[in-house]
Image (cartoon, rainbow, N blue to C red):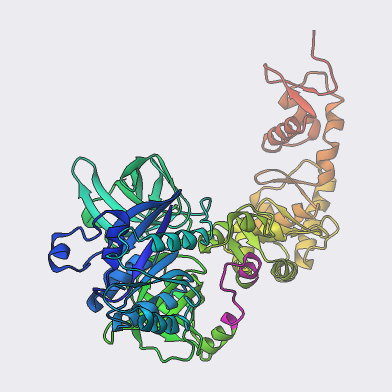
């Protein structure tokens, strides 16, 4: 299907041409038919050869320009109508200004009512005006529905126009700008719009800008029901999960996660240098939103939107001054998640940055600018999913710019080194401390930064070069040496908590001693020399097999407080085996009889 919009001054015959081409009445409301002009958007369709054409017939009256913009905002081509007996008129110019601002490049110039006046003057004037815009060079055709009721010349020109249109992206993310909302008895809420990209299916879950999710209950296109509709198409969508009062023209139905809902965007203007008012109306798709405008330089601006819109990099819209009924400039979205502008000179610096931005999404450039970013966020900004997935970064959810990654690794090594100098008793740096210090958005990214001699162990980043040979702070080393001297005399006489405190050994000091291999932690509050654990089996070999815990305690010359946890530790290490009767065997001894 091909979808075309009409444009042109009021009462220049747009609806008449559509009616004659299609045999359908685009002005469907009684008031429109009574007054003989299009008040709201009208729709009709026909076939030309094998081509299915649908028309969005827009109003031409100056008071209805917002409705006209809603009609042309989602279509790829326009049929621009100028009456031979009327010539170029004010709304002709305003419609052309809007189409130029939206960078509409595909179209057909139609001079109508050639039975009422010679088309030459109107055609020359119209071609001159279009020649200064994005529609320069489009084909033109002069028609008269009276002289040629089949409009054969117009049909042939339309066939040539649609054959030149680019193929729509049926695999891309779906965004349907709503242009009408109504209720159908027995079905419920129905919205219509032009599906310009993607594919819609019955049963799909869709999302609004505010995050609400809806389900597609049914689909129609050109009056027929479908289970699937691909772009480009006019569609009517029966929705489950909402009422007609909750939706309006300008809402957008999107594939969940495919667009970023935002109130703040940086844009490039098509009319460079023109002074912009502080407040204006943004027209994009079928949406009309009040915006606060902050010019950054002659070519770029920041827009603060009064309501969220689901936008992507590269989206085209226009700014309009409703007071003067004037199109101010076209805008192309460059950034849907721009940085704050706080300090003096930030606006000028931002303008210099935006000068390097491409008009279309650029995966590598976005990663370089943002340094660390969710891949899903890049997709929502407009980066193709395959490009986002291919960006550097070991984590499937996050991408990291390579240069920034090297800088982060350098900073991590510095952080671990400084932490060891200021907190020598701590075992490395906690992952959350690293995350905060380096400004990372997620703890899981710390793993990407760790390279030898650093290692990630038990939720901490440690320097593996500092192990058993690392020196403890002198006061702690002296206390540990005193304890080791006691243990040399009585290897299994582990000091109690008070004795440890008397030696000046608290939890941090003991943990550091264990970390460097000066002590072995048998259980909570039980510390021995490392060699005592290694040599604990020697006394047990002198005992009859199997042996009791009491026999083991006596062999070690210690108390139950130490013997029981030491036996359990040997069990864990596989050096001893606990039997059902609570006796034990050395692991290299056979079980009795």
Residue at 69 percent of width and 56 percent of height? 447
Q: Where does the image place residue 523, in percent across and percent down from the top left?
A: 68, 42
Q: Where does the image place residue 533, in percent across and percent down from the top left?
A: 80, 39
Pick the quarter of the image with the C terminus.
Answer: top right
Q: Where does the image place residue 385, in percent across and percent down from the top left?
A: 59, 55
In which quarter of the view is residue 60 placed? bottom left
Q: Nearer the viewer, residue 533 or 488?
A: 533
**Image-based side of 265 in relation to 366, left or right:** left
**Image-based side of 166 in relation to 465, left or right:** left
What stretch of residues is rendered in magenta? 353-368
Residue at 35 percent of width and 52 percent of height? 46
The image shows residue 234, relative to residue 335, as above or below, that is above
Most distant residue in the top direction: 593
Would residue 254 be visible to someone looking at this image?
A: yes
Q: Nearer the viewer, residue 392 or 528?
A: 392
Residue at 47 percent of width and 83 percent of height? 301
The image shows residue 511, relative to residue 530, as above or below, that is below
């Amino acid at each position: 299907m091909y979808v075309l919009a009409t444009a042109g001054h009021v009462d220049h015959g747009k609806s008449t041409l559509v009616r004659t081409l299609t045999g359908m009445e685009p002005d469907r409301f009684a008031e429109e038919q009574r007054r003989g002009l299009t008040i709201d958007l009208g729709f009709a369709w026909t076939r030309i050869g094998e081509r299915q054409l649908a028309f969005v017939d827009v109003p031409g009256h100056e008071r209805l320009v917002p409705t006209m913009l809603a009609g042309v905002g989602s279509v790829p081509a326009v049929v621009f109508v100028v009456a031979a007996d009327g010539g170029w008129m004010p709304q002709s110019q305003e419609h052309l200004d809007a189409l130029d601002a939206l960078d509409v490049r595909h179209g057909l110039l139609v001079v109508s009512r050639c039975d009422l006046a010679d088309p030459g003057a109107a055609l020359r004037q119209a071609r001159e005006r279009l020649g200064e815009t994005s529609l320069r060079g489009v084909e033109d055709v002069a028609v008269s529905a009276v002289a040629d009721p089949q409009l054969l010349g117009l049909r042939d020109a339309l066939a040539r126009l649609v054959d030149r249109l680019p193929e729509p992206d049926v695999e891309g993310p779906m965004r349907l700008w709503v242009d009408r909302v109504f209720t159908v008895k027995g079905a419920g809420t129905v919205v219509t719009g032009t599906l310009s990209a993607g594919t819609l299916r019955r049963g799909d879950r869709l999302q609004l800008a505010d995050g609400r999710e809806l389900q597609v209950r049914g689909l129609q296109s050109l009056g027929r029901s479908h289970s699937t509709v691909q772009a480009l198409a006019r569609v009517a969508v029966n929705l489950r999960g909402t009422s007609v009062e909750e939706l309006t023209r300008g809402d957008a139905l999107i594939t969940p996660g495919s667009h970023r809902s935002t109130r703040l965007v940086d844009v490039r203007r098509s009319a460079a240098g023109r002074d912009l008012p502080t407040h204006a109306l943004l027209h994009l798709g079928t949406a009309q939103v009040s915006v606060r405008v902050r010019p950054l330089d002659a070519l770029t601006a920041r827009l603060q939107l009064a309501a969220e819109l689901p936008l992507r990099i590269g989206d085209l819209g226009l700014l309009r001054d409703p007071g003067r009924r004037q199109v101010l400039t076209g805008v192309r979205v460059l950034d849907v998640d721009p940085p704050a502008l706080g300090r003096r000179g930030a606006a000028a610096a931002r303008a210099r940055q935006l000068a390097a931005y491409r008009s279309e999404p650029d995966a590598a450039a976005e990663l370089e600018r943002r340094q660390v970013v969710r891949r899903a966020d890049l997709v929502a900004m407009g980066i193709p999913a395959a490009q986002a997935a291919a960006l550097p970064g070991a984590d499937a959810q996050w991408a990291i710019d390579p240069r920034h990654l090297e800088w982060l690794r350098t900073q991590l090594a510095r952080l671990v080194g400084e932490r060891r100098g200021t907190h020598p008793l701590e075992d490395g740096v906690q992952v959350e401390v690293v995350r905060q210090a380096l400004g990372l958005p997620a703890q899981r990214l710390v793993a990407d930064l760790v390279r030898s001699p650093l290692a990630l162990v038990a939720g901490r980043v440690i320097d593996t070069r500092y192990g058993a040979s690392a020196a403890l702070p002198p006061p702690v080393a002296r206390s540990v040496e005193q304890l080791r001297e006691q243990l040399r005399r009585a290897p299994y006489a582990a000091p109690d908590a008070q004795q440890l405190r008397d030696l000046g050994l608290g939890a941090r000091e003991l943990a550091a001693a264990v970390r460097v291999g000066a002590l072995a932690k048998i259980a909570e509050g039980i510390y021995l020399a490392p060699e005592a654990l290694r040599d604990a089996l020697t006394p047990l070999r002198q005992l009859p097999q199997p042996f009791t815990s009491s026999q083991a305690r006596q062999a070690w010359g210690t108390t139950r407080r130490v013997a029981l946890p030491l036996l359990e530790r040997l069990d864990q290490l596989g050096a001893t085996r606990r039997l059902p009767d609570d006796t034990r065997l050395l692991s290299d001894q056979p079980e009795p009889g």
